[in-house]
Amino acid sequence: MAELDLPVDQLRTFTADVPVPDDLDAFWDRTLAESRAVRRAPELGDVVLDLPGLTVTDVTLSGFAGDPVKAWLAVPKGATDLPIVVQYIGYGGGRGVPHEYALLPAAGYAHLVMDTRGQGSAWGNGGGTPDPHGAGPALPGYMTRGIESPDTYYYRRVFTDAALAVDAAKELPGVDPSRIGVMGASQGGGIAIAATALADGVSAALIDVPFLCNFPRAIRMTDSDPYAEIRRYLAVHRGDVANAERTLSYFDGATLARRGTASSVWSVAIMDDVCPPSTVYSAFNAYRGPKQMVEYAFNGHEGGQLHQMPHQLALLDSVLRG
């Protein structure tokens, strides 16, 4: 895929004209308060991987409406008083298998990997968290589930899970609750934006090629899934465009980024046809905390992959170790 978006010099200053609901703050305050009222402490299960320098434990978190959400907790063996990074997964993937997560513990961080409810069967090594809530008629995939209303939309549950995972991270053994980061790529990057905006106490955010940003532009710009799920849905539900866009406005990273204050490092791929770079910059340029962007000029949605990790570790070391 060649460049499909604005020239890079225009991308760097691009801002989104995304409608902000009048009750955005009230909606999220109510949503989080309802789930926190029934939240349980994280439950530590079996140690599923025990190596000389690494221990991984099965964890059950309390998510939206008290629903159980699976996670892995990977830590350097025997360490205490650890900074912790909460990771969110890309679209269709799950938490996978425990030996996928050794890098951050090797660098001295606890690593909490949150499963994404209802996903985990499209790529990778699987997930284990159902989504027990129903929805109205929807296109295959997750993007249009419950799109009739912000209260029923799928990502209301996912974003609540993400914020409550940060709450849970503070209560895990061996963790310093004052040193918390979040991270994710693609869908995980969009969820990380939401967690940074909605959770309390996030100090660092690692946001790669984020999805779920500037919905109005994305669904009109790219033919690639997952955004194209919404376009195909609206091609059938011809009279529902305004209502669907109203629902999406409560979950748009270009809006939620305005609430983010954690120190952050982002990435964008200039030839990305899945998350077009202008949608990424829509969120980045709205973000209010300290931020830096790493551009990958000739990459598609794979972005920088592990080439981004040195930038991420540098930020974590400066912010969470200080």
Image (cartoon, rainbow, N blue to C red):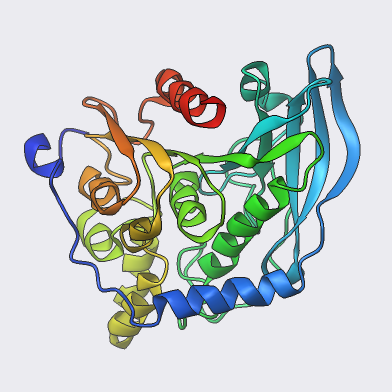
How many marks can you see?
Answer: 0
Q: Is residue 271 above or below residue 260?
A: above
Q: Is residue 117 visible?
A: yes
In this view, 227 is above or below 72? below
Q: Residue at x 25, y 66 (%)?
A: 216
Residue at 61% from the left image edge and 35% from the top image edge: 124
| Residue 248 spot, x, y in % from top left | 38, 71
- Look at the picture and state if 225 lies above or below 247: above
In front of the other: 316 or 301: 316
Residue positioned 70% across, 47% down in the render = 170
Q: Residue 174's spot in the image, x, y percent?
A: 79, 33
Percent from the top left, x then y, of residue 289?
A: 35, 46
**Can I make out residue 147 in this image?**
no
Residue nearest the observer in this picture, 77 or 158: 77
Q: Residue furthest top?
A: 52
Q: What quarter of the picture does the N terminus occupy?
A: top left
> In this view of the protein, which residue sits in the foreground, 288 or 256?
288
Which of the 4 image quarters holds residue 246?
bottom left
- In this picture, residue 111 sits left or right of residue 302: right
Residue 150 x/y as whole percent: 47, 78
Question: Extreme bottom residue here?
Answer: 239
